[in-house]
């Protein structure tokens, strides 16, 4: 079976490499030619643990190639996985222009039966539009199917998530498309759930929005903990012991970021409203999330009063650990706010600094990027932990304290036990606990 993957970003590249590793013949393509050049040479343009080795392995095996020629790639394929972006528009709805563009490309190159698989996260009813666009623009009467196979990988563990999925959702409306997709995912037979397309599309949006809601829920509870003697970490642990609730995604902090939760919860709210369904639960969860950074800055101001000309060290810029992705990262809003207040910033992240430089370029007297946490805290009036990278868990506290002007720490991810940090002579503030 010949498989094409269109879009070689976080999802598309992992999908192409993962499907090749499952033994399929795969061609990946992207509209950014440089990306294809780099990937063809075995150079992964993003940071994703394990991806580099798996890409090289499958390129060498010969069943994975990348091509800049989208026409040929589409024509040669029987199954096409569409992995392009579905970013957020100003009004919160999903921008479907990349999906439309690819649908037109597929229509133009529809030379034989193909299954067009939506792997990108799309609003329910998208398949109807893809079908309409392909039907409108195709030049022949060649048959095709649209299917939905949403992706659930998490950045930072994308390779192992792809190769050890909890579930494979296949939304189809023909036996032919179902059989092809079931064959592709043969090795995960016991984890396949077959549904209609609307259901599959909705499973993805509903899952992401639910997880985002869980995060906002514990963050709301953490605000309550701060007004009482309760400790949010223990509240979460106690809640999580209930199997119906579970401990995952009950981590109080700076809220959710990344390229999925913030846009998916808004997109689901929008599509619901367009279809006449009240989605206020999701809107409230998103509002809680938006307020997290403000609450965090208030904590900092409570320590330093005036931020103008203060030196602030920030550890962690990516939206979560083990990725270089900064899309919708809370760090962006925090940096913008601190610059607005006139602070000096010293920033460190193990992987995401280069990406952040394209949003906030280095400026000698306002913002610098440094090579390690110890440089970051140089003469700092406060140290902020923004992302819970593992390497921050074993810092040399003596050196940190010696390098800082004021030993003040605000931990936005509850990385440490308050008593451990305080006994080393720091003022320590975290989320939802004393
Ligand atoms: P991305 O921005 O990293 O990658 C998208 C890729 O598509 C880019 O390389 C871009 O150049 C390419 N592209 C855009 N238009 C194209 C076109 N017309 N033809 C060919 N290539 C084109 O995005 P991503 O993070 O990989 O996300 C892709 C989709 O998967 C989104 O819908 C996202 O919501 C969903 N998703 C993302 C994740 C994640 O963790 N990143 C997880 C699950 C689902």
Image (cartoon, helix red, strand yellow):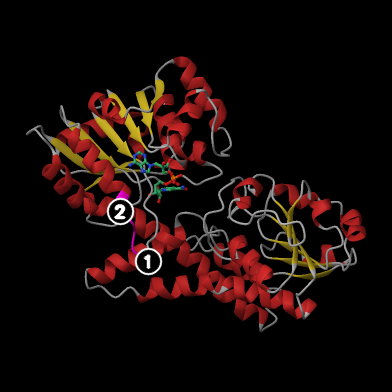
* In the displayed structure image, the side of residue 294 where residue 341 appears, left or right: right
* In the displayed structure image, the side of residue 16 where residue 416 appears, left or right: right
* In the displayed structure image, the side of residue 336 where residue 198 appears, left or right: left
Q: Residue at x 50, y 41 (%)?
A: 158
- Where disc 2 sits, the SS reads loop
Q: Residue at x 43, y 41 (%)?
A: 11
Q: Looking at the image, in which quadrant does ligand 1 appear?
A: top left
* In the displayed structure image, the side of residue 283 where residue 327 appears, left or right: right
Tell me which corner region of the image, top left, top right, bottom left or bottom right, holds residue 73.
top left
Is the residue marked by circle 1 packed among few (<14), some (14-19), or many (20+) residues within 10 Å? some
Q: Residue at x 33, y 43 (%)?
A: 119
The overriding secondary structure of the stretch rendered in magenta is loop
Mark identifier at residue 96: 2
Most extreme residue toward the left, as rendered? 141
Image coordinates for residue 114, horizontal then vertical, percent: 19, 32
Q: Are marks 1 and 2 in contact (CB under 8 Å)?
A: no
State how many labels appear. Answer: 2
Magenta residues span: 92-97
Most extreme residue toward the top, as rendered? 61
Asked if residue 192 shows in the view, the reply is: yes
The question of residue 93 being in magenta is answered with yes
The question of residue 91 being in magenta is answered with no
Is the residue marked by circle 2 packed among few (<14), some (14-19), or many (20+) residues within 10 Å? some
Mark identifier at residue 374: none
Vertical placement of residue 238 versus 376, above or below: below
Image coordinates for residue 316, horizontal then vertical, percent: 68, 54
Along the viewing direction, whichever of 354 and 81 lies nearer the viewer: 354
Task: State how far apart marks 1 and 2 are (Cα).
Answer: 12 Å
Mark identifier at residue 92: 1
């Amino acid at each position: 079976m010949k498989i094409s993957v269109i879009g070689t970003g976080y999802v598309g590249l992992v999908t192409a490499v993962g499907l090749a590793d499952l033994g399929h013949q795969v061609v990946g393509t992207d509209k950014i030619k440089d990306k294809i050049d780099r990937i063809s040479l075995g150079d992964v343009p993003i940071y994703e643990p394990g991806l580099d080795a798996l890409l090289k392995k499958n390129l060498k095996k010969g069943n994975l190639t990348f091509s800049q020629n989208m026409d040929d790639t589409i024509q040669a394929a029987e199954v096409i996985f569409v992995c392009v972006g579905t970013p957020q528009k100003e009004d919160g709805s999903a921008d479907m222009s990349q999906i439309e563009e690819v649908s037109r490309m597929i229509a133009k190159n529809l030379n034989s039966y193909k299954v067009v698989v939506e792997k990108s996260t799309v609003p329910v009813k998208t398949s109807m539009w893809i079908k309409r666009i392909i039907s409108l623009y195709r030049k022949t009467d060649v048959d095709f199917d649209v299917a939905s196979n949403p992706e659930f990988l998490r950045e930072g563990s994308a390779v192992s998530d792809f190769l050890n999925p909890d579930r494979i959702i296949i939304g189809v409306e023909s036996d032919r498309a179902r059989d092809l997709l079931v064959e592709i995912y043969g090795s995960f037979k016991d984890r396949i759930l077959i549904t209609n397309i609307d259901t599959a599309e909705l499973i993805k949006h509903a899952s992401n929005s639910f997880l985002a809601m869980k995060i906002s829920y514990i963050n709301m509870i953490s605000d309550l903990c701060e007004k009482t003697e309760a400790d949010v970490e223990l509240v979460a642990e106690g809640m999580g012991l209930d199997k119906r609730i579970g401990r995952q995604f009950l981590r109080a902090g700076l809220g959710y970021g990344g390229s999925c939760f913030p846009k998916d919860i808004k997109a689901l709210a929008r599509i619901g409203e367009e279809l006449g369904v009240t989605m206020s639960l999701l809107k409230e969860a998103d509002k809680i999330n938006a307020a997290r950074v403000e609450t965090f800055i208030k904590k900092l101001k409570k320590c330093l009063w005036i931020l103008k000309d203060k030196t602030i060290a920030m550890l962690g810029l990516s939206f979560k650990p083990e990725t270089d992705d900064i899309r919708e990262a809370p760090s962006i809003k925090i940096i913008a706010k601190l610059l607005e207040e006139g602070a000096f910033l010293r920033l460190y992240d193990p992987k995401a600094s280069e990406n952040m430089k394209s949003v906030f370029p280095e400026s000698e007297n306002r913002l610098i990027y440094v090579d390690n946490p110890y440089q970051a805290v140089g003469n700092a009036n406060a140290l902020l932990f923004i992302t819970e990278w593992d390497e921050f868990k074993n810092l040399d506290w003596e050196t940190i304290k010696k390098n800082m002007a004021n030993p003040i720490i605000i931990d936005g991810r509850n990385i440490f036990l308050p008593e451990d940090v305080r006994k080393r002579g720091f003022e320590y503030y975290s989320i939802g606990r004393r």
